[in-house]
Image: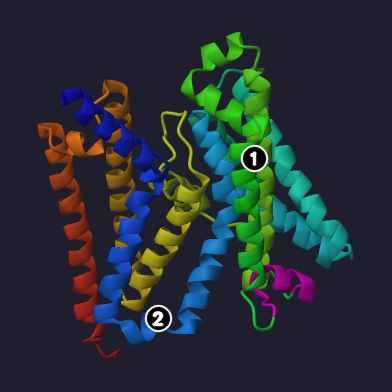
Amino acid sequence: MAVTDTNISRSLNERLEPFLAIIGPMVMIIALLAFMAVVEPARYFRWSNINLILLDAALYMPMAMAMTFVITQRGIDLSIGSIAALSAIIMAFLIKQYGFSVYIAVPIAILLGALMGLINGLIITRFNVPDLIGTLAMDLVYRGFALVIAKGLVLARFPELITEIGRGQIPGFIPIPVIIGIATMIGGYILLKRSYFGRYTIAIGSNPEAAELTGIAVNRHKVYAYVLCGACAALAGVMLTGKLNAIQATSAPYFNLHVIAAVVVGGTSLFGGRASMIGSFAGVLLLSMMINALVTLRIEFFWQSVASGVVIVSSVALYTWLQKKDRDGAGGLIASLMTPEGQKMTRFSALIIGALILLLAIGAIFAGNPQASG
């Protein structure tokens, strides 16, 4: 009988395993939709607002795809915001000051982003600088170059093709940026699941020493991931320029935190070896929907940061517990939830969800009673 129970538990765990990464963000998405359906259904669910959510999410999809590979191999890239800004600034100058065609300037911007990613990778692998310190330092360098080149200018009014990339829409279909973002996520999913690049990424994140002993060029593969991240950051910079029809050196200041949050919320482990491209996609959608909900409820920007931080902390805690459960062989998810540690995690998750609902409720109350401006 005990053997039968164990087999049932293992079977349940095996069936749930592919979906564990997206359970967290999907539950939060459903809870958010239910809450907004009660307090602000007319404003939140109108097509123009849904379009805004999709456009916002699309901007982060390429970077989330690339960051999934970087984090899976136990890395981090804090420079993507400045890479996006610097690449876009250079593209803008090529178009507006030197008369370059968009068809030349955009590929140059993406290649420059890939070059900056290559520099990041070489600093980390050749000089043994920790990923966190190396990319943080290069974030300052790239942002400094952007400030020097732009000299405080705001470059605006770009050719139609640039604005189409950032906010265009095929008539009767979804916006062009959403198509670009989803295409990059599908490409990332194929790379992760169907290529040696994805397999090597997971192997390196699980055990770098063992991966090297099997013949994987660990450092070279890490560089590839940073090159991909830089190129995708530059693509996001082009999309941001098109979305705003303007760019300046201080643009994209929080890209790194938003993207890392989306990837972590989606179930990719900061400790390496666990990745979910579908989870990263769900994480991007969740954060865009949550920030849009906070704006709809007229909650101040600072509270948006608080809510994002709470979601990150709760997600990391949840996935750390799930990873420990896997290592300890707790006998399935249901059995793990019945342990004292599992019950503690359940109470913690309920507290976090309650705090978010309270924050949204406060926003809803104040949204219904806006103060008159004097």
* Quadrant in which the C terminus appears: bottom left
What's under tag 2, amino acid-wise?
Phe
Mark 1 surroundings within 10 Å by alpha-carbon count, few (fewer than 14), some (14 through 19), many (20 or more) = some
Q: Is residue 338 left or right of residue 187?
A: left
How many circles with numbers are drawn on the protein? 2
Q: Which residue is mark 2?
A: 45
Give the percent coordinates (x, y) of residue 264: 41, 43
In this rendering, is residue 266 above or below 334? Answer: below
What's under tag 1, amino acid-wise?
Leu
Q: Secondary structure at mark 1?
A: helix
The reply to whether residue 243 is in sight is yes
In this rendering, is residue 6 above or below 334? Answer: above
Most common secondary structure along the magenta stretch = helix
Q: Nearer the viewer, residue 134 or 234?
A: 234
* Residue in the picture at 73% in, 76% down: 157
| Sequence-first disc among 2 and 1 | 2
* Quadrant in which the N terminus appears: top left
Q: Which residue is mark 1?
A: 191
- The range drawn in magenta is 158-170
Label disc, if present, on residue 344 of the rendered structure: none
Give the percent coordinates (x, y) of residue 250: 57, 57
